Image (cartoon, helix red, strand yellow):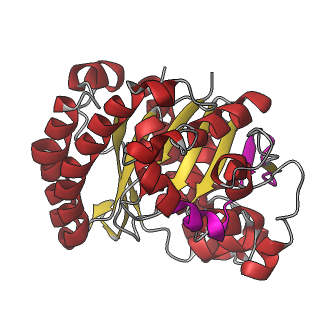
């Protein structure tokens, strides 16, 4: 069965999209069938994968039948259309036969309000009973169609109803972080929010109306599988002193705040985590320096940073040698991260 992994942090600018693209590509290169799902209405992942520069480019793909994006895939439930939700027709990612994309849609944001009302679990629930289970149903159907091992979900930086639903119904989630003050603050916020979402999901799962809906609400089982820290500046093979200070603060926040809260909410088993990986859940699953100029080439060529070629970078000599050394380092780190994900989701 396809496993759903969400990349979530309500703080923006923490490399959720680039992590989803590069990690997803690596997992696919290592033999897994992977679907990238763009649930951020900003559609940055869709643009990165397909080389789109703006809304006009996106508009050209929104006329597919069957549906070929997240918003149209969910439309039968959210717009009361006389048809059932079916699998999305995914886009094949250029250069990787094992990697697919469910494109995003800017108008997915229009579903937030209706889903929020449905998730209040109030007297209006009967009319909206099909909404809370619809997102997971769509991902299940799409995963089954393509025999996918994983769906990696890129989420928006918010605490809105769609994100609540994705975390409540996924199998696993990663928390991308940036070594700065605001990411440290975000950990306390996540420690308060994620357990509330888990409690809500357990209530929703036990409501008879949702259990008998066309798209039944699934049993909550989301598990934290680690944090990813990216975009620090290196020095002497590691993070510079200023960035290392914030990395240490993030690890402390994970250890003292987030992980204990998630353990209490049954969203991580620290002993099982360590048995599978050899380290504790508050230790980052991946630490990676800033991609710098490589990210621009990656976006231009729809290629992960570790797979860029000398021709794509258009540099030779010492510049290429330095870039290649960095790329090989990124490849090794991402491969190690992918192996850890496989262990934690086995």
Does 325 lie within the magenta span?
Answer: no
Q: Is residue 263 visible?
A: yes
Question: Residue 26 occupies which quadrant of the picture?
Answer: top right
Residue located at (80% from left, 44% from top) = 82
Question: Residue 135 occupies which quadrant of the picture?
Answer: top right
Residue located at (73% from left, 79% from top) = 55
Q: Is residue 232 left or right of residue 216?
A: left
| Above-or-below relation of 283 to 290 | above
Camera-side residue: 101 or 337?
Answer: 101
Residue located at (63% from left, 21% from top) = 1
Q: Is residue 286 left or right of residue 326?
A: left
Give the extent of the magenta segment. 92-112
Camera-side residue: 345 or 70?
Answer: 70
Does 99 lie within the magenta span?
Answer: yes
Q: Is residue 30 left or right of residue 195?
A: right
Residue located at (84% from left, 65% from top) = 61
Q: Is residue 306 left or right of residue 14?
A: right
Question: Residue 271 occupies which quadrant of the picture?
Answer: top left
Q: Is residue 283 visible?
A: no
Q: Residue 58: percent from the left, percent from the top? A: 77, 72
Q: Count numbered badges in the picture.
A: 0
Camera-side residue: 145 or 95?
Answer: 145
Q: Residue 227: percent from the left, percent from the top? A: 33, 47
Q: Residue 148: percent from the left, percent from the top? A: 70, 31
């Amino acid at each position: 069965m396809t496993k759903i992994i969400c990349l979530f942090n309500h703080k923006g600018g923490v490399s959720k999209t680039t992590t989803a693209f590069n990690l997803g590509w690596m997992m696919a290169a290592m033999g897994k069938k992977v679907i990238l799902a763009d649930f951020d209405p900003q559609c940055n992942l869709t643009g990165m994968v397909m080389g789109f520069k703006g809304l006009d480019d996106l508009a050209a793909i929104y006329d597919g039948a069957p549906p070929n994006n997240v918003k149209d895939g969910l439309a039968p439930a959210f717009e009361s259309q006389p048809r059932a939700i079916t699998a999305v027709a995914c886009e094949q990612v250029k250069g990787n036969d094992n990697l697919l994309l469910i494109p995003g849609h800017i108008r997915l944001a229009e579903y937030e309000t209706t889903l929020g009302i449905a998730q209040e679990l109030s007297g209006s629930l009967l009319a909206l009973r099909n909404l809370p289970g619809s997102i997971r149903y769509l991902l299940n159907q799409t995963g089954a169609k393509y025999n996918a091992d994983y769906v990696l979900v890129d989420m928006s930086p918010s605490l809105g109803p769609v994100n609540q639903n994705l975390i409540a119904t996924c199998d696993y989630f990663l928390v991308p972080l940036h070594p700065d003050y605001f990411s440290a603050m975000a950990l306390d916020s996540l420690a308060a929010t994620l357990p509330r979402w888990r409690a809500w999901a357990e209530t929703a799962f036990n409501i008879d109306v949702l259990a008998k809906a066309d798209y039944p609400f699934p049993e909550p089982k989301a598990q934290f599988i680690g944090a990813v820290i990216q975009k620090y500046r290196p020095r002497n093979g590691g993070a510079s002193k200023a960035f290392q200070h914030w990395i240490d603060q993030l690890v402390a926040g994970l250890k003292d705040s987030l992980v204990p809260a998630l353990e209490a909410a049954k969203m991580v088993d620290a002993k099982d985590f360590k048995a599978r990986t050899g380290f504790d859940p508050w230790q980052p699953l991946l630490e990676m320096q800033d991609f710098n100029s490589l990210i621009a080439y990656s976006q231009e060529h729809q290629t992960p940073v570790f797979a860029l070629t000398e021709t794509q970078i258009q540099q030779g000599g010492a510049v290429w040698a330095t870039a290649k050394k960095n790329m090989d380092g990124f490849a090794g780190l991402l491969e190690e991260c992918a192996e850890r994900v496989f262990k934690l989701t086995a």
